[in-house]
Amino acid sequence: MDRIAAATTDLSKVYGSGDNRVVALDRVGIAFREGEFTAIMGPSGSGKSTLMHCAAGLDSPSSGSVRVGTTELSTLDDRKLTALRRDRIGFIFQAFNLLPTLTALENITLPLTIAGRRPDRDWLDRVVAMVGLADRLDHRPAQLSGGQQQRVAVARALASRPAIVFGDEPTGNLDSRSGAEVLGFLRDSVRELGQTVVMVTHDPVAAGYADRVVFLADGRLVDEVAHPTPDRVPDLMRRLSEGNPQPPALHTHSRTR
Ligand SMILES: Nc1ncnc2c1ncn2[C@@H]1O[C@H](COP(=O)(O)OP(=O)(O)OP(=O)(O)O)[C@@H](O)[C@H]1O
């Protein structure tokens, strides 16, 4: 049986009340299997960021549940939730969010330093080698290109060997060549290092690097494509944005409800 890195059950998130009430997520159930690369797509406002933030313990559900590994997040107090995010979850943001005064290596190991943990030297060497930063470790962010800075952020996300890595538009600030490199490294972290990656993206080409793409519309999971290729994803996106979530013939299995 596949092991589950993180999962949501009947996850709903409602913002505001009365006339301002927005149902950002409507009973979303999704499992992220260990060693799998998932892309989350959907129109603007469909709930992608909210799903990622709830699954990563950055936001709390209105109802339903989230687990990371076997840990149910609702059972954790703030201190334990912070520790779980730090120790078991990696984050990669659109803006690289590196500390300018630290070297690349110091940025990569910062979450471990804060946690008072000693880096696993072998693992760190593998991660640094994978993202091709071995000869840049003493550079500061300003001395690195955008693509190199995002590679530092990828290595930082992987440094603790987390249960799951969440990326929020990780290539949104990169040119297509640097974006392709970063996506390749994310895919390598899954294929070669056995990591689990979930990425929100608007870019069908980026989604083409994933093992599967899930589509949200109006806070619901409306479809899922396994082994996407860049030519299949835009077709699905077009149909969804036209308000017709009928799965086209090319999909492998559907979760429409
Ligand atoms: N803090 C908040 N307060 C009120 N409404 C919110 C809040 N955060 C999100 N929403 C609403 O919830 C819905 C889902 O938002 P979310 O940011 O998850 O969508 P998204 O698919 O990530 O959008 P985008 O692609 O534009 O980033 C939207 O209608 C949004 O306006």
Image: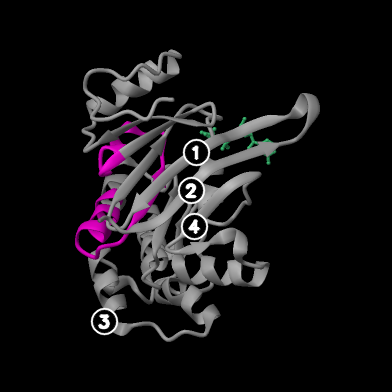
Q: Which residue lies furthest to the front in this view?
A: 1
Q: Distance between the residues labelled 4 and 1?
A: 13 Å
The kind of residue on which mark 1 rests is: Val
Magenta-highlighted residues? 183-212
Q: Which residue is labeled 2 in the image? A: 8
The amino acid on which the numbered mark 3 sits, given as a three-letter code, is Asp
In primary-sequence order, the first of circles 4 and 1 is 1
Q: Which of marks 2 and 4 is nearer the N terminus?
A: 2
Of the pair 30 and 176, the residue shown nearer to us: 30
Which residue position is annotated with label 4?
Answer: 67
Q: Few, some or many C-alpha atoms within 10 Å of disc 2 (few <14, some 14-19, many ≥20)?
A: many
Pinpoint residue 67: horizontal percent, then vertical percent: 49, 57
Q: Kindly identify which numbered label has been placed on residue 122.
A: 3
Q: In this view, does 47 lie to the left or right of 197?
A: right
Q: Which element is circle 1 on?
A: strand
Observer-side mark, 2 or 3, equals: 2
Coloration mode: one colour
Question: Looking at the image, which residue is at 27% across and 45% down?
Answer: 180
- Residue 37: x percent and y percent? 30, 49
Question: Where is residue 155, by image quadrant?
Answer: bottom left
